[in-house]
Amino acid sequence: MKKGKRYQEAAKLRDKTNLYEAPEALAIVKKAASAKFDETIEAHLKMGLDGRHADQQIRGAVVLPHGTGKKVRVLVFAKGDKADEATAAGAEFVGAEELIPKIQNEGWLDFDKVVATPNMMSVVGRLGRILGPKGLMPNPKAGTVTMDVAKAVKELKAGKIEYRLDKTNIVHVPIGKASFTEEQLAENFQTLIDAIIKAKPAAAKGQYIRSATVTSTMGPGVKLNPAKF
């Protein structure tokens, strides 16, 4: 597939054969992001894990120091005082069983993250087929199934991201926007790497992070040297 002129120009900024250190790679990606919108900067990490084995799974969440640059709309499934706490913390949508038909029958999905109190998970479970494939299902490991809904909402608004191994044993996560400074991107990236290294399963063998690439929405990928992590 032929790439556009803008992409080809951006690709000249990096040496395909080189493995860069994170700050330099992020500077190249930022410079290459020349679209008319504020491109998202993403990290893609190929892990030395086999996700088919439960003891080699990694899944968790981390608050990026500079956020993701994206406004996050939060839906909270809670009742009573917990519903009030979620509203006070800034959740856009708060409710219980009455939201089920709206999502199931009307296809309402005007939210980016879902939080639920543990006692609401039997209700939320009915939405598994809809929320699951979209990565929206609340999960205790990601801190989105919790009694402290206020903390969960505030962290998501502040730039908490979830990381998990996909079927090809790669972790894909946003680490900011092209409008961020190089320092902000580098700090966000390092925070992510620190969290993933801390989450290393005991069953992991060999090189843990096999390869790493950073890229913008429309730009070329820049490879990092994983030995430097």
Image (cartoon, grey):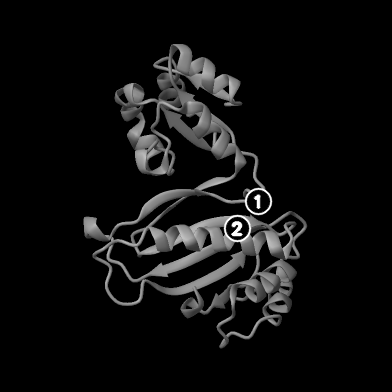
Determine crowd level at label 2: few under 14, some 14-19, many 20+ residues with C-alpha closer than 10 A: many
**Residue 139 image point, x, y percent:** 37, 39
Residue holding disc 2: 188
Q: Looking at the image, how many numbered discs can be counted on the residues?
A: 2
Left-right relation of 152 to 133: right
Residue holding disc 1: 66
**Residue 11 image point, x, y percent:** 67, 78
Left-right relation of 129 to 41: left
Q: Amino acid at mark 2?
A: Asn
- Lower sequence index among marks 2 and 1: 1
Q: Amino acid at mark 1?
A: His
Q: Which secondary structure lies at badge 2?
A: helix
Q: Which secondary structure lies at badge 1?
A: loop
**Residue 43 image point, x, y percent:** 54, 63
**Residue 159 image point, x, y percent:** 59, 45
Image: 40 above or below 141:
below
Residue drawn at the location 41% of the way across and 28% of the way down: 116
Residue drawn at the location 31% of the way across and 29% of the way down: 125
Tag 2 and tag 1, C-beta contact below 8 Å: yes
